[in-house]
Image: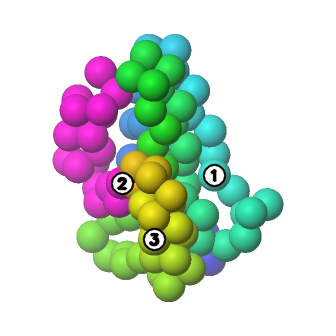
């Protein structure tokens, strides 16, 4: 099932914000399996790695996405579920800028 356009637009906000600042933001894809977060941000200036799942108001996390969130958090990773453009702007302001 194709992703809703709003999710793609919100994800692009993150990609653009990272690119402007020279922060690596890669697509988390299915080579690992289904449900892996949409983006992985390597914030070398803050020495942090963020795992980002992008949603919008009409969609919920799937079971496999919740499992990945659990594994990431239990391993000490920083996982963020971003729900729409307002939350993405907040995330960019608080964690990328």
Q: Position of residue 28 (x, y in %)?
A: 63, 52
Q: Position of residue 48 (x, y in %)?
A: 44, 32
Q: Position of residue 40 (x, y in %)?
A: 55, 43
Residue 33, picture quadrant:
bottom right
Mark 3–mark 2 Cα distance, whole angstroms, equals: 12 Å
> Which residue has dot 1 on it?
28
Residue neighbourhood size for the residue with mark 2, other residues' Cα within 10 Å, grouped as few (<14), some (14–19), many (≥20): some
Q: Which residue occupies 45% across, 52% down? A: 76
Query: Does the segment drawn in magenta span residue 39?
Result: no
Name the outermost residue toward the bottom. 63
Q: Which residues are magenta?
A: 80-97
Q: Which mark is residue 92?
A: none
Residue 80 horizontal side relative to residue 67, left or right: left
Residue neighbourhood size for the residue with mark 1, other residues' Cα within 10 Å, grouped as few (<14), some (14–19), many (≥20): some
Q: Earlier in the sequence, mark 1 or mark 3?
A: 1
Q: Which residue occupies 40% across, 36% down? A: 13
Towards the viewer: 79 or 8: 79
> Which residue has dot 3 on it?
70
Mark 1–mark 3 Cα distance, whole angstroms, equals: 16 Å
Q: Earlier in the sequence, mark 2 or mark 1?
A: 1
Tag 3, which secondary structure? helix
> Which residue has dot 2 on it?
80
Whether residue 64 appears in this view of the structure is: yes
Towards the viewer: 77 or 83: 77
- CB-based contact (under 8 Å), mark 3 and mark 2: no
Residue 10 horizontal side relative to residue 26, left or right: left
């Amino acid at each position: 099932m194709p992703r809703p356009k709003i999710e793609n637009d919100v994800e692009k906000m993150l990609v653009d914000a990272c690119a402007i600042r020279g922060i690596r933001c890669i697509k988390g894809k299915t080579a690992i399996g289904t449900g892996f977060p949409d983006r992985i941000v390597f914030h070398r200036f803050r020495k942090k790695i963020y795992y980002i799942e992008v949603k919008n108001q009409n969609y919920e996390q799937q079971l496999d996405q919740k499992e990945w969130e659990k594994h990431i958090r239990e391993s000490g990773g920083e996982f963020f579920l971003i729900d729409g453009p307002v939350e993405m702007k907040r995330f960019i302001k608080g964690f990328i800028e």
